[in-house]
Amino acid sequence: MSTSTAPLAFLKGHGTENDFVIVPDPDNAIDLPAALVARLCDRRAGIGGDGLLHVVRTAAHPEAHAMAGEAEWFMDYRNADGSVAEMCGNGVRVFARYLEHAGHIAAGDVAVATRSGVKHVHLAKNGDVTVSMGRAALPEDGVTVTVDGRSWPARNVNMGNPHAVAFVDDLAHAGNLFTEPPYSPAEVYPDGVNIEFVVDRGPRHVAMRVHERGAAETRSCGTGACAVAVATARRDGADPAATGTPVTYTVDVLGGTLVITERPDGEIEMTGPAVIVAEGHIDPDWIGA
Ligand SMILES: N[C@@H](CCC[C@H](N)C(=O)O)C(=O)O
């Protein structure tokens, strides 16, 4: 499956327990078909992860080379099932942590190319990593999400990737999330969707669970937390563009806490931890099996 017979180097990292297999491949020399990505992300037979971060020089990737003047590195993001996604908010923070860990950047600031454009990431000395996520789009259409006989209207929020945000009374009402909750009309999300369930915790403080497209329930989703913060702000009547005042929400996820600020120009910043856990090599015989 790989064009290389040398052992494949990998690392493992996470951001608020949204975990990733990291495959450094500066020259884009490694063939990563969907089936191999899914095997690597398998928690029992592989390394395990909610997704895979393929680390490629921007100039070396056909989907990214136009951004080479703005960012040296491209996050080629894959979901655990091998599908391609436009953006991953926790992934891009872990990606920046990897670049620092590998000595590709000094601690501080780095631009990372993604399928959703160039994102600017700041690594703070306290271990937090902040990413400027860009603006949310809030299309008027929405869907109804149903779990175990309960239904909720869900707000359509696009953070470069698609989200449906449903406010519920109790996070347990989201059920086991082993499979994607049904939603309708399906045509709103022709490429699938990430579905967030949200409860209030206090003033500008919410908690969420998520069913991620291509990965099932995960313990955190950065783009999802941003979508939740924006949807909650609008529900609460808070719009930074209208008032000229930034709005900050604390979003609890199963794996920790993310802090999301929406600025008057619409820019959304997300802060949270990003950690490298391990590194090693994948047995070429396993890849070829
Ligand atoms: N966990 C990510 C989102 C990963 C992509 C998502 N599953 C999709 O298909 O859009 C995040 O932290 O944003």
Image (cartoon, grey):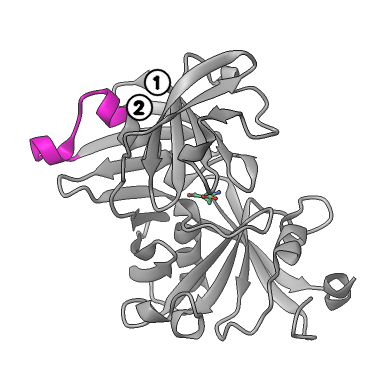
Element at badge 2?
strand
The picture quadrant where one finds residue 242 is: top left
Q: Position of residue 44 (x, y in %)?
A: 82, 50
- Name the foreground residue: 66 vs 90: 66
Location of residue 216 with respect to 207 vertically, above or below? below
Does the magenta-highlighted stretch encompass residue 20?
Answer: no
Residue drawn at x 48%, y 52% is 90
Residue contact at pointers 2 and 1, CB within 8 angstroms = yes
Neighbor class of circle 1 (other Cα within 10 Å; few <14, some 14-19, many 20+) is few
Task: Quarter of the image for the N terminus: give it.
Answer: bottom right
Location of residue 75 with respect to 199 vertically, above or below? below
Q: Position of residue 127 (x, y in %)?
A: 42, 55
Task: Quarter of the image for the C terminus: give it.
Answer: bottom right
Q: Which residues are magenta?
A: 232-246
- Name the foreground residue: 277 vs 238: 238
Q: Position of residue 171 (x, y in %)?
A: 54, 21
Residue drawn at x 31%, y 46% is 136
How far apart are the two marked residues, 2 and 1, measured between alpha carbons?
Answer: 5 Å
- Is residue 256 at least partly visible in the picture? no
- The total of numbered circles placed on residues is 2
Mark 1 and ligand 1: say if the CB distance to the nearest ligand atom is below 8 Å: no
Amino acid type of disc 1?
Arg
Neighbor class of circle 2 (other Cα within 10 Å; few <14, some 14-19, many 20+) is some
Q: Which residue is mark 1?
A: 201
